[in-house]
Image (cartoon, rainbow, N blue to C red):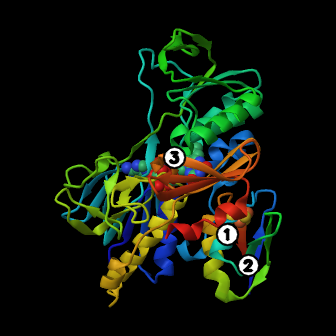
């Protein structure tokens, strides 16, 4: 029997890749290996509406489609090594999985802060459903919640914790929350809206130490302030899950480098024909912007890159005559991002973090508004609060 | 025929679906989502793509 397509990471990217393989006419076996015990689910609600209500797998699970009913799921199992010479993956149960093609969809894990007292309990990070369930239990009215990191996830958790009645302080190392992605004007506006809801910010600050016996009771900030703390949430960025790929001469410096067909690159810059990477873990150049390979942690990227990889894999394994043409297809997916904080619903296209300036082009800064983001004279992004039709109208401007 | 359901308690009117299946989904003049609940099978691929891009995962195809 033919070897399967093996997908590592039972993630959104992994699921969308399996579905797309079927859509592109690959009928052979598919195995999905996932470290988490769950079938793929949607992560964004974990910091937003689901965290505010009840966190459960059914609240966030992706609907299963009949096309992928015959996928072989190997869950609660971690891939621990790869051998690209022999085309095999070995898992934590000692099982070896030969593959016809491999898809790496192992995503990211949260970075943690490094401090002296790091073994104290009641420290949380937010990536998985299990993380969200554990955190949800602690977000009670009156609790002192300290969030380290004022990026999107930190700010969304701040908004949700506030809604749940907690006292919330955000410690952030820049002058405004979400500054890198939104620019000075919009970031400071969102800061005001958070402050109006009662969130306190400590800006250009970091954590010096944690205080407590076994459970955390306080946080010492680097200006000497000591904050009461029942729950610490660390939202200080992420690390790509690439350790298991070692010893294969793969470029895995900040995620896995791939070409425009999502094929994994060796350190000598040659692609491995039957090994692909997709989603948050994949680093690739997007010609919309330039030729610099980047990881893009936006929710639409796993789906876009999954479909691209699946089109190539299906053509390769089906020995389709147009395989070379498919390999050469242009791949320029438009990143898209959204965020919900209180009644502020942000929608963005492009890569706003590349910009050196932002310009208000519609609406009022105090209400609904739209910003354009430029790197020199190039439009690299757009972001709006509300005003959907205006923001959606920008899609065609990035081609 | 396929049947399409949007959970309007989840939908935040982002309009991502409009781009994938413009024959089915549209934003009205108030920027609110409107959609056609039944469509020809030929729209299935577009509606599945709309399901994939909906940030709130609010769209379902009812078989
Ligand atoms: C709380 C939260 C809120 C977010 N909100 C937004 C938002 O509002 N807007 C937006 O655009 N994006 C948002 N994102 C980002 C978005 O969810 C991610 O871009 C997306 O989930 C990435 O999907 P992925 O398929 O690349 O992999 P991931 O979702 O990271 O999944 C990777 C999977 O692989 C598994 N794995 C790792 N290593 C191994 C191994 N060795 N063997 C087997 N399995 C392994 C992991 O356990 C995990 O299940 C948010 C993310 C989080 C965590
Ligand atoms: S993409 Fe989803 S949230 Fe957005 S308008 Fe369509 S159904 Fe509503």
Q: Quadrant of ligand 2?
A: bottom right
Classify mark 1: helix, strand or loop: helix
Q: CA distance from mark 3 to mark 2?
A: 37 Å
The label shown at residue A357 is 3
Classify mark 3: helix, strand or loop: strand
Q: Chain of mark 2?
A: B
- Spot occupied by residue A352 in the image (x, y as percentages of width and height): 52, 51
Q: Residues within 10 Å of mark 3 (few under 14, many from 20)?
A: some
Q: Are marks 1 and 2 in contact (CB under 8 Å)?
A: yes
Please name the residue that numbered disc 1 is placed on. B17
Query: Residue at horizontal 68%, vertical 44%?
Result: A48
Q: Earlier in the sequence, mark 1 or mark 2?
A: 1
Please identify, in this view, whether the residue under mark 3 or under mark 2 is nearer the observer: 3
Q: Relative to A148, is A392 on the left or the right?
A: right
Q: CA distance from mark 3 to mark 1?
A: 30 Å
Q: Residues within 10 Å of mark 2 (few under 14, many from 20)?
A: many
Which quadrant is home to the N terminus of chain A? bottom left
Q: Would you identify the image quadrant in which residue A58 lies?
A: bottom right
Whether label 1 lies within 8 Å of ligand 2 gets the answer: yes
The label shown at residue B24 is 2
Query: Residue at horizontal 58%, vertical 41%?
Result: A152
Q: Chain of mark 3?
A: A
Inspect this view and state whether residue A384 appears.
yes
Up the image or down, A332 lies above or below A104; here it is below
Q: Residues within 10 Å of mark 1 (few under 14, many from 20)?
A: many
């Amino acid at each position: 029997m033919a070897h399967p397509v093996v997908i590592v990471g039972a993630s959104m990217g992994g699921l969308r890749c399996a579905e797309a393989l079927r859509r592109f006419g690959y009928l052979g076996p598919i195995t999905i290996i996932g470290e988490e015990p769950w079938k793929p689910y949607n992560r964004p609600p974990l910091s937003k509406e689901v965290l505010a209500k009840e966190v459960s797998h059914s609240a966030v699970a992706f609907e299963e489609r009949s096309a992928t009913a015959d996928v072989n799921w190997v869950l609660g199992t971690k891939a621990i090594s790869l051998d690209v010479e022999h085309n095999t993956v070995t898992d934590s149960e000692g099982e070896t999985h030969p593959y016809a093609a491999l898809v790496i969809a192992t995503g990211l894990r949260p970075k943690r802060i490094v401090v002296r007292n790091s073994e104290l309990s009641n420290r949380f990070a937010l990536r998985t459903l299990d993380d969200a369930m554990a955190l949800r239990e602690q977000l009670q009215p009156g609790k002192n919640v300290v969030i380290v990191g004022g990026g999107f996830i930190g700010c969304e958790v701040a908004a949700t914790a506030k809604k749940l009645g907690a006292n919330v302080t955000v410690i952030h190392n820049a002058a405004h929350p979400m500054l890198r992605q939104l620019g000075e004007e919009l970031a400071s506006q969102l800061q005001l809206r958070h402050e109006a809801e009662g969130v306190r910010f400590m800006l250009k600050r970091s954590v010096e130490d944690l205080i407590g016996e076994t459970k955390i009771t306080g946080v010492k900030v680097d200006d000497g302030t000591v904050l009461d703390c029942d729950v610490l949430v660390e939202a200080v960025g992420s690390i790509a899950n690439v350790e298991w790929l070692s010893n294969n001469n793969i470029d895995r410096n900040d995620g896995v480098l791939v070409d425009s067909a999502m094929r994994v690159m060796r350190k000598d810059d040659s692609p491995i024909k039957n090994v692909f990477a997709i989603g948050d873990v994949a680093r690739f150049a997007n010609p919309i912007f330039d030729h610099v390979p980047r990881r893009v942690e936006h929710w639409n990227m796993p789906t876009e890159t999954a479909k691209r990889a699946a089109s190539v894999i299906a053509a390769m394994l089906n020995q389709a005559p147009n395989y070379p043409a498919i390999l050469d297809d242009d791949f320029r997916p438009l990143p898209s991002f959204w965020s919900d904080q209180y009644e502020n619903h942000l929608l963005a296209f492009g890569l706003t973090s590349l910009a050196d300036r932002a310009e208000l082009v519609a609406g009022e800064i105090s209400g609904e508004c739209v910003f354009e983001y430029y790197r020199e004279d190039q439009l690299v992004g757009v972001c709006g609060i509300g005003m959907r039709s205006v923001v959606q109208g920008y899609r065609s401007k990035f081609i | 025929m396929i049947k399409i359901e949007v959970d309007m308690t989840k939908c935040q009117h982002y309009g991502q679906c409009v781009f994938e299946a413009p024959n089915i989904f549209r934003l009205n003049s108030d920027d609110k989502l409107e959609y056609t609940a039944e469509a020809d099978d030929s729209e299935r691929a577009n509606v599945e793509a709309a399901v994939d891009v909906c940030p709130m995962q609010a769209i379902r195809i009812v078989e």
